[in-house]
Each structure stands twice: as C-alpha cells, then as structure tokens.
Amino acid sequence: QVQLVESGGGSVLAGGSLRISCVTSGSYYDTYYMAWFRQVTGKEREGVAAIVSAGDTRYADSVKDRFAISKDNAKNTLYLQMSSLKPEDTAIYYCAASAMTAKARLSLNGINYKYWGQGTQVTVSS
C-alpha cells in the first residue's frame, strides 16, 4: 500500500511561481511511476506531468516550458515547480503513483494510476 500526501498549494498572482510537493510512504518509492494531475470542479481530471526513475519526463502541452516535475528519492518526495502561472492553472492538484507497467510509463491518463493523494488547491488570480 502506498500513501501520498501533497502540500505546498496556495494562492498566487498570475505570472508567479509555486512549488508543490508529494511525500510518499508505505512502499519502496523508486519502484513506482509518478505523475501530477489537476482537476477543476465540474471538469475532467487533466494529466499535467509524469516522471520515471530514469528521469524521463512528459508534460501536457498546456504546461510545457512552464512546469517542471522532479523527484528526490532520498526524501521520497515528488515535486512540481510551476512558473509563469496563469488563472487557468487554478485547480486541485493531485499526485498519483502506479506500479511500473508499460501502460503507466509516462502516462498522463489517470486510469493508469492506482494510488492518489488527497490533493492541494492552487489558485492563480489575475
């Protein structure tokens, strides 16, 4: 069983930056594929960024060149550094983990992830 706990959300002005974190516990951290998703109430969940142990990453077009996903294996922590934030980035951000299957590798589809955190709210105002 894997537990995921996000933190670091908050309110920021458009153009600003924010870093959110996700601490993993309950299993071997580096044996899972990890990703960030976001969801606005009433809209579908959107895959934002994914990362694998080798450091390969994948981003949604909407955040490419603005967001950076990274992981610190020593701290069992996944990060999402968000820059040049826009009001449309406002959402609840969730981290997710999956066993290392071919489908889950760098996937931005939530159906491929089994474990989810409780989410952290990010609000960007203009």
Image: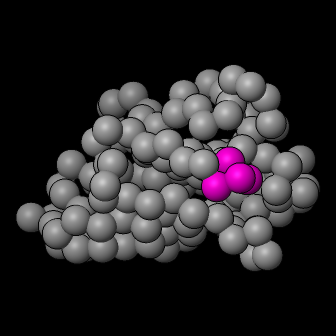
Q: Residue at x 30, y 67 (%)?
A: 83
Quadrant of the frame with the C terminus? bottom left
- Counting from the top left corner in percent of width and height, residue 113 is at 68, 34
Q: Nearer the viewer, residue 45 or 77?
A: 77
Q: Is residue 121 visible?
A: no
Q: Verify whether residue 78 appears in magenta.
A: no
**Region in magenta:** 51-55
Note whether 40 is above or below 76 in the view shown: above
Q: Is residue 34 visible?
A: yes
Q: Nearer the viewer, residue 20 or 121?
A: 20
Q: Residue at x 37, y 73 (%)?
A: 18
Note whether 72 is above or below 100 in the view shown: below
Note whether 75 is above or below 27 in the view shown: below
Query: Which picture quadrant has residue 110?
Result: top right
Query: Which picture quadrant has residue 21?
Result: bottom right
Q: Verify whether residue 54 appears in magenta.
A: yes
- Counting from the top left corner in percent of width and height, residue 49 is at 49, 46
Tell me which secondary structure the magenta stretch mostly adopts.
loop
Query: Which picture quadrant has residue 48?
Result: top left
Q: Residue at x 68, y 48 (%)?
A: 52
Outermost residue toward the left?
Answer: 126
Q: How is the image coloured?
A: one colour
- Counting from the top left corner in percent of width and height, residue 24 is at 76, 62
Give the side of residue 32 with respect to residue 62, left or right. Answer: right
Q: Nearer the viewer, residue 34 or 4?
A: 34
